[in-house]
Image (cartoon, grey):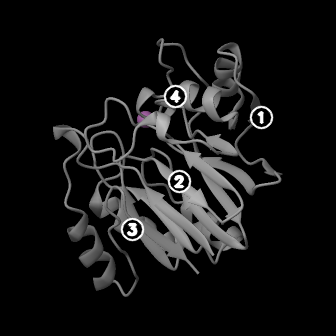
């Protein structure tokens, strides 16, 4: 069983009972976040989808406290290594079996400038396989047709975590289309309502996915979804 806990925006805590991973820990400066960066004591890894500050977030503070390894594209990894963190660099299309999970990076159509304005490579999505469960975190991205390939090659996906907030990423209409390409058992919206420019109604996403015969649920900040 894998527990997926939402900490708002695109931050997810993935825990299989013996290992714990954080994805895109943007907590301080995020009014919707339910936890503080110093609340994490034990963490195996922090997986980063791209360099934007609302995804790299509190990585340096959390990794220094917990000793978590940072897993990301090479450019984000080099940036974090320069901050004194332990990193494992990967790149799009590549996968690696870590002691805590298998991580594979996918394409995402977006940017990846870093906290200091430098370009930190290409943005990514992540396919995380942990305790036999497969979770796709789309990162920040536009809708793209190769999501169909992700569904065909790596499905059945147990969960797809999809941005719906528009402006920087897919909107609800695009994300509903993405659920058809991916074919995941459960679709969960993210990257919405953090700021006025990405206001979206997650219940609208759920009802539109349901109208197409697929399943979606809303997981609120501080809530969890058990993947079993
Ligand atoms: Ni971004």
Q: Which residue is mark 1?
A: 88
Q: Is mark 2 within 8 Å of ligand 1?
A: no
Q: Earlier in the sequence, mark 2 or mark 3?
A: 2
User: Residue 113 location, x and y as percent?
Assistant: 49, 22
Q: Quadrant of the N terminus?
A: bottom right
Say which residue appears at 72% left-offset and 52% top-offset.
104
Mark 2 and mark 3: span between their CA atoms?
A: 26 Å
Mark 4 and mark 1: span between their CA atoms?
A: 18 Å
Q: Which residue is mark 2?
A: 13
Identify which residue, 20 or 8, lies in the foreground.
20
Q: Are marks 2 and 4 in contact (CB under 8 Å)?
A: no
Q: Which residue is mark 4?
A: 112
Q: Is residue 224 left or right of residue 29?
A: right
Mark 1 and mark 3: span between their CA atoms?
A: 33 Å
Identify which residue, 97 or 197, lies in the foreground.
97
Identify which residue, 226 or 54, lies in the foreground.
226
Camera-side mark, 1 or 3? 1
């Amino acid at each position: 069983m894998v527990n997926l806990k939402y900490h708002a925006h695109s931050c997810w805590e993935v825990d299989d009972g013996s290992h714990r991973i954080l994805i895109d820990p943007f907590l301080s400066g995020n009014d919707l976040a339910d936890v503080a960066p110093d609340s994490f004591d034990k963490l195996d890894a922090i997986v980063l989808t791209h360099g934007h500050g609302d995804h790299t977030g509190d990585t340096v503070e959390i990794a220094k406290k917990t000793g978590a390894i940072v897993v990301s594209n090479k450019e984000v990894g080099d940036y974090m290594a320069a901050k004194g963190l332990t990193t494992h660099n990967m790149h799009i299309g590549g996968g690696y079996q870590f002691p805590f999970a298998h991580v594979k990076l996918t394409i995402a159509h977006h940017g990846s400038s870093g906290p200091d304005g430098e370009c930190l490579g290409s943005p990514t999505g992540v396919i995380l396989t942990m305790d036999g469960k497969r979770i796709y975190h789309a990162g920040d991205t536009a809708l793209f047709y190769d999501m169909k390939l992700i569904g065909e090659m790596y499905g059945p996906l147990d969960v797809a975590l999809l941005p719906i907030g528009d402006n920087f990423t897919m909107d609800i209409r695009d994300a509903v289309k993405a659920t058809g390409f991916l074919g995941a058992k459960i679709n969960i919206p993210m990257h919405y309502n953090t700021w006025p420019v990405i206001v979206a109604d997650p219940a609208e996403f759920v009802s539109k996915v349901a109208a197409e015969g697929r399943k979606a649920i809303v997981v609120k900040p501080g809530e969890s979804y058990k993947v079993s």
